[in-house]
Every structure is written in structure tokens, then in C-alpha cells.
Image (cartoon, grey):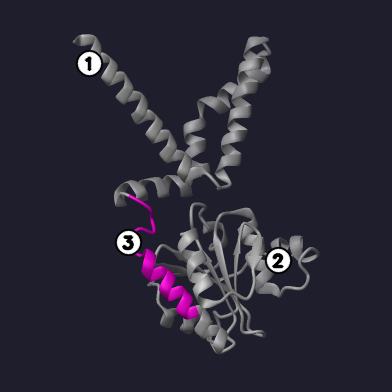
Amino acid sequence: MAWFTTWVTSVFDILLVAGILYFLYTIFRDTNSMTIVKGFLVVLAVYVIADFFQLSTLAWILRYIVGNFVILAVVLFQPEIRRIFSQVGQGGSVFHKPYSNVVEELAEAVFEMARQNMGALILIERNVGLRHLMEDALAIDARLSKEMLFSIFYKGNVLHDGAVVIQGDRIVAARVIIPAVKIDAIKTKRFKYGTRHLAGIAITSECDAIALIVSEEKGTVSLATEGHLAFDLEYENLKRKLYELL
């Protein structure tokens, strides 16, 4: 009987570890952090090789990096660590509770702005944090609503030229200026789009954020993900895409 208990315990232990690893994978997949993880695995492999061939100087340097990986991980993976604790605390996705409201409010807001030819750039944060874009922005902590977005992107408002960042069901920043160097890097490839569209493409090409763009000139709504643009969307089509992405 003891062997059966040991076997069940071992199987449960393996399944539990596998579940934790898969959970961590879902947090890090499709993010820039996967590149960092792969880089660390390369460093670890080089360290093992250097230690095996007794390359003392190289092995000492790499041993220091590997030995301080926990500290490096806290700095490099700060957005992902925050997301892990957020998901554990909520028992699911960060968008679990405000999910439907987020999609409905965003869809209604952008299409109403399109009808009134109000330009807008809305960035929806997912796994990868956008804090690096918000250093010089106006910090906001407001519930996402159509009225709030209208007040920000109203042409008479000094904030309307920048982007807005959304986390969950909260508007966390306005007047977010996308660095010109990011826009210039893709301008030659997608010259037919305006600055807001280029900015949305630039940001989503380097992280997993979603960009909603309202054209002031054409009165159209577009969505950018992974550096690709879905142009001139219909209302129901936009809602379907947002539900899928969130």
C-alpha cells in the first residue's frame, strides 16, 4: 500500500509542477520577456561549457550573472511578476471581471468619435507593461468610460494629441507621446498611414499591446496588433476582435 501512496504522490507532484510551469508560460508567451529567457538559457549553456573546459575567467563572469539571476529577474520581469500576482489574486485573467464592460465601452467610444471625426490613439496593455511610455505622461486613475475618453480626445483639450493607456478597466495615463524614432523606423514601409496609425503599428510591433486608432480625417476605426493593422473596421467586427484578443 505504501508503494501506491508514493506513486500517487509522485504523479501529483509532477502534475503540479507541470501546471505551474504552464501557468508561467502563459504569462510570458508572446511577450518580449521570452527573448530574455532564451538569452539567459544561452548564457547558462555557455557557462556550463566554459566550466567544463576550465575557462576560468569566462566561467567566473558567467557564474556571477547566473548567481544573481534572481535579482536580475525582479528588475527585468517586473511587469510579468506583477501580472502573476494579479492573476493569482483574482483567480484568472486580469480582464476577468471588467471584460465585457471594457469591450463595450471602447467600441461605443471609438465609433462615436469616428462619427464626429475626433482623432484618438488608445493603447490597451496586456502582458507586457507600457510603463516606459508613461514616464512623461499625465498619470490618471479613472474608470474606463466613453465620457472619459471623449473628454480626453476632445479637440479643445491639450491632451488630445497624445495616446491613452488602459490597464484592465482603468485609464492610467493620457498625453502619452510615442517616441518619433519608433515611428520613423516603420514610416518608409507604411507611408500611406497617418502618424497615429504609424504609432500604433510601432508600439504593437515590439509588445503585445492592442492599439485602437480613430482617424480624424477619414472618420474610420482601425486596430493594430503585433505590428499589423486592421483598417476601417465595422462595429461588430471590432467587438469580436477585442473579445478574442482580451
Name the quadrant containing residue 224: bottom right
Decide which of tag 3 and tag 2 comes sooner along the chain: 3
Q: Secondary structure at mark 3?
A: loop
Q: Residue at x 40, y 30 (%)?
A: 18
Q: What are the residue bounds of the magenta stretch? A: 92-109
Give the residue type at disc 1: Thr
Of 16 and 84, the residue lying toward us: 16
The location of residue 195, given as percent across then percent down, is 69, 73
In the displayed structure, would residue 4 be above or below residue 138? above
Question: Few, some or many C-alpha atoms within 10 Å of disc 2 (few <14, some 14-19, many ≥20)?
Answer: few
In the rendered image, residue 227 lying in the magenta stretch gets the answer no
Residue 166 seen from this side: yes
Q: Which residue is mark 2?
A: 180
Q: Distance between the Cα atoms at labels 3 and 2?
A: 36 Å
Pair 1/3: label in front: 1
Labelled disc at residue 60? none
Q: Which residue is mark 1?
A: 5
In the rendered image, residue 107 lying in the magenta stretch gets the answer yes
Give the residue type at disc 3: Lys
Give the residue type at disc 2: Ala
